[in-house]
Image (spheres, rainbow, N blue to C red):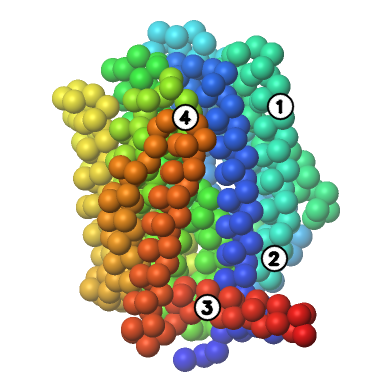
Amino acid sequence: MKPIADTGGGRPLSHQVAAAGSLAVLGKFAARLIDLALLAALSRLLTPADFGLVALAMTAVLISESITQTPFGQITLGVADPQASHFDTTFTLSALRGAVLAALLAVAAWGMARVYHDARLQPLVTTLSLAPILRGLYNPRMIIFARVMDFRRDVALELAGKAVAFLVSGALALATRSYWAIAAATIATPLTSTALSYVLAPYRPRFSLAHWRLYRGFLSWNTLAQLARALSWQADRLILGRFLPRAQLGGYAMASDLSGVALQAVATPLEGPVYAAYAAHRRAGADLAEAHLKAANATLALVGPALVGLSMLAAPLVALLLGPKWTETAALLGWLPLAYLANLPVFHLGGLAIILDRQRIHAERVLIEAALLLPAMAAGAMIAGVWGVVAARLGASVVMLIVGFALVRRLIGVSVVRQFAALRRSLAALLVLAAALGGLSPAISYAGTPALAASTFGVGLVGAGAYVATLFALWVAEGRPPGVERLAAERLAARLRRRERRAA
């Protein structure tokens, strides 16, 4: 096997990925904390009906965006020596994508206002369309930092965008008590980060299609895959919007959004470092199997506890974060995180398919998911309302986990049994976590906010301790094999050595 080239700093690639992933996760975690603080404020200033209206409008935006979305940055990352003309082509295609998106959303805004008999949707959808257009104009030259595993600027840009959104949206909510405060936050974040990206990586945009053929193979399969995936994960709101009042839709959307926080805070920021590691393995001609199995287990080990904790402690967390107006959301939050949990072991399948230039396999996955989930959600909504949709999402997530394992086998030849075995320590530790939280949750006190916060934190801390102890005990019992546990242990040991040297 060929050695994997160092991407900078003289450190092993696994350590560079761990360092980059840690930074990205910490940055995303900080961004999600800002989001949660804003959410807590808005949930008290606005009503569930306001959130339901914006959730319905955002569904049209996200689906329309997915039709024209192409991972231009990931494609450029795979180029051995990108030139200015590559960045120009990326910018041009992104700008054209924005123009197409604006046209699609203009039609969608008009249609939704009539289908849902709500005139507020037309100006709201049109305004929200600015967010994906602004994201598409993000500086393509920022990819030069990802090539050397440097994600500091990306973290700074996201935090700056979230901070501005918090200030703008909070001020507007206090002044107007209007759902437009939610829309303002959605637009302020990409506006700020996109503008600042041209400061951190100076680049003068030029229109060019010199390398459009490089992206041609991605356009067809990726467009189809993104559309199918967006329909799978956004159609629930469109469907429920026809059956539920806006307030109930708002409660469901809130539970779904909170369920996705852990995914956005940890799994999503890991995509960049993991994809960069895949690219480095591919350039070196190294085997991708071990890299993917480590990434899958690390994603489950890092994100899984948050999803299990969110599910097991849904009632006290909703009471603390959202307040009494959202009590019904807690029951939904007890189940929806489990749908995201089942996706974690195959979360990086799309990046793996892209790096191997086999986008068709990723497209097959999301098309199967759409064909399974969409009719199940529609039938579930008609039969049992919101709980029918929840059941459909849970059932489909289990099926899609098996499908994902099978597609990984097609991509890199790793058997389903081996993929499942690579997750054994994390799965066992998650079961211990669930048992600990379930056993201790009756001890949570609802006698006032301080008591509720202290007892919830205490139960969560004990559960986290049980999870970490189980994970590392199993790792030691297996002879300390390579993986996320070894990386964590090595980083902790290095930090302790530095502290001892400073003390000496």
Q: Residues within 10 Å of mark 3 (few under 14, many from 20)?
A: few
- The image's mark for residue 150 is 2
Image quadrant containing the C terminus:
bottom right
Mark-to-mark CA distance, 1 and 3: 42 Å
- Which label sits in the foreground, 4 or 2? 4
Type of the residue with mark 3: Ala
Q: Residues within 10 Å of mark 2 (few under 14, many from 20)?
A: many
Q: Is residue 380 above or below residue 434?
A: above
User: In terms of image quadrants, where is residue 247?
Assistant: top left
- Which label sits in the foreground, 1 or 2? 1
Q: Residues within 10 Å of mark 1 (few under 14, many from 20)?
A: some
Residue at x 39%, y 57% (from the top left corner): 463
Of labels 4 and 2, earlier in sequence is 2
Residue position marked by numbered label 1 in the rendering = 168
Type of the residue with mark 4: Gly
Q: Residue 45 versus residue 2: which sits nearer the camera?
A: 45
Type of the residue with mark 2: Asp
Residue position marked by numbered label 4 in the rendering = 448
Of labels 3 and 4, earlier in sequence is 4
Asked whether disc 1 touches disc 2, contact meaning CB atoms under 8 Å apart, the reply is no
Residue position marked by numbered label 3 in the rendering = 489
Q: Is residue 481 above or below residue 38?
A: below
The kind of secondary structure element at disc 1 is: helix
Report x, y in % for residue 91: 69, 48
User: In terms of image quadrants, where is residue 133?
Assistant: top right
